[in-house]
Image: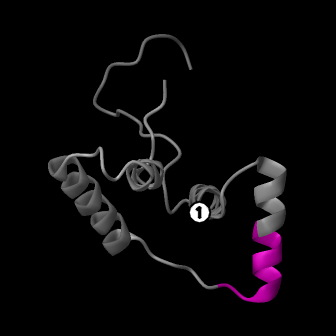
Amino acid sequence: MTTPDTATLLEDAADRIADISRRDLQIMLRRAALRLRNCGSIALVDDMEEAIRDVCSELVLTREDAIRYIVREWTEKNTYLPVHNLDEDRDVVGNA
């Protein structure tokens, strides 16, 4: 079972506003406010937007997930982000 996202919870609360408790509504609104405060928007030029749309449709990702994927791949391939960490202090078993 997946946990519903904040937007789904807010939509559900709007549909049954008379039935939802004040406390639950406060929690959902605070959660939504935090998400809005912490979200960022990336504006790209038209040809880049088209490329992102192509990636989204090919990989079945949202725009944000596609951008995260592209940035992660680029940073790993250009060694800005390690692909994996080596534990140099541990004993190695086997032959090299």
Task: Give left or right: position of 79 versus 74.
Answer: left
State the image coordinates of residue 33 (x, y, percent, origin top left). 29, 68
How would you rate the neighbour count of disc 1 (Cα within 10 Å): few for under 14, some for 14-19, many for 20 or more?
some
**Mark 1, residue position:** 64
Task: Give left or right: position of 35 versus 55.
Answer: left
Q: Principal SS element in the magenta part?
A: helix
Seen at 57% across and 60% down, the residue is 68
Question: What's the amino acid at mark 1?
Answer: Glu
In which quadrant is the C terminus drawn? top right
State the image coordinates of residue 8 (x, y, percent, origin top left). 47, 49
Q: Residue furthest top?
A: 94
* Residue 10, picture quadrant: bottom left
Which region of the structure is painted magenta? 44-52
* Residue 79, picture quadrant: bottom right
Instruction: Check the image and report above or below for 61 versus 46.
Output: above
Seen at 73% across and 89% down, the residue is 45
Q: Residue furthest front?
A: 18
Viewer-nearest residue: 63 or 2: 2
Seen at 43% across and 35% down, the residue is 3
Task: Give left or right: position of 27 versus 86.
Answer: left
Disc 1 on helix, strand or loop? helix
